[in-house]
């Protein structure tokens, strides 16, 4: 963990670093709540690692993100090419693997999908996605306190609420919406 934190301090802004620590803390708390095997704390450790590394490429220059994807055959959509800030999850998973030797697919996928989500997310993916939204330092957003409670009661309803709020926010701001966010939301509406 020390090596990861040292890297993050060097590559993230002070605010992003504090956000990252908040996400890791929240992911650990949620992992303790939802741990599928209470005799094994490995799931909690995975949540902490994914939480710490989820934004490790966030402050990287957008051209560099695209270059890393191109040089390493990391696929991206036309939408992501036009909005390369969205690639920080995919590039972050690449950094986790190459820089820190993390080969656990569940951790790598949680890092990859923490921004848009995707249908049929794993438990760890949901935890990191939600932790990113509800961490203690998050600036106030509509229904945040309700979602924070819901996250520890019904993880799928928390996912649906976050996705809906995200779509409403992007629409209100006139920002483009990644089709994967909409697809993920639609999948939750269908299953709930």
Image (tube, rainbow, N blue to C red):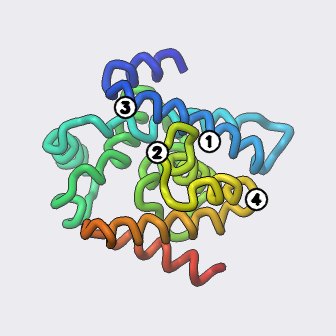
Quadrant the N terminus occupies? top right
Distance from the alpha carbon under mark 1 to that under mark 4:
15 Å
Q: Is residue 23 visible?
A: yes
Residue at the spot 70% in from the left edge and 44% down from the top edge: 31
Distance from the alpha carbon under mark 1 to that under mark 2:
18 Å
Mark before the other along the chain sequence, 1 or 3: 1
Quadrant the C terminus occupies? bottom right
**Dot 4, how many residues are within 10 Å of its Cα: few (below 14), some (14-19), or many (20+)?**
few
Identify the mark at residue 98; answer none if there is no mark: 3
Identify the mark at residue 52; answer none if there is no mark: none
Return the residue at label 4.
153
Dividing the picture into quarters, in which one does residue 180 lie? bottom left
Q: Do the residues labelled 4 and 2 touch (CB within 8 Å)?
A: no
Residue at the spot 73% in from the left edge and 53% down from the top edge: 152
* Left or right of 181 in this view: 145: right
Q: Are marks 3 and 2 in contact (CB under 8 Å)?
A: no
Identify the mark at residue 139; answer none if there is no mark: 2
Q: Position of residue 28 (x, y in %)?
A: 66, 37
Classify mark 2: helix, strand or loop: loop
**Dot 2, how many residues are within 10 Å of its Cα: few (below 14), some (14-19), or many (20+)?**
few
Distance from the alpha carbon under mark 4 to that under mark 2:
22 Å
Return the residue at label 1.
27
**Dot 1, how many residues are within 10 Å of its Cα: few (below 14), some (14-19), or many (20+)?**
many
């Amino acid at each position: 963990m020390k090596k990861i934190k040292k890297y993050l301090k060097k590559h993230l802004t002070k605010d992003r670093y504090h956000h990252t620590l908040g996400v890791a803390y929240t992911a650990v708390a949620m992992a303790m709540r939802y741990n599928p095997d209470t005799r094994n704390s490995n799931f909690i450790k995975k949540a902490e690692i994914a939480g710490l590394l989820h934004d490790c490429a966030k402050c990287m220059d957008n051209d560099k993100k695209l270059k890393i994807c191109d040089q390493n055959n990391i696929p991206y959509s036309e939408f992501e090419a036009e909005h390369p800030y969205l690639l920080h999850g995919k590039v972050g998973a690449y950094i986790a693997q190459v820089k820190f030797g993390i080969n656990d697919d569940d951790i790598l996928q949680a890092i990859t999908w923490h921004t848009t989500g995707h249908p049929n997310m794993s438990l760890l993916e949901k935890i990191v996605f939600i932790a990113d939204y509800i961490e203690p330092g998050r600036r106030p957003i509509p229904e945040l306190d309700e979602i924070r409670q819901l996250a520890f009661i019904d993880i799928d309803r928390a996912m649906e609420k976050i996705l809906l709020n995200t779509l409403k926010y992007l629409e209100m701001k006139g920002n483009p919406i990644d089709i994967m966010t909409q697809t993920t939301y639609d999948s939750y509406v269908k299953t709930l």
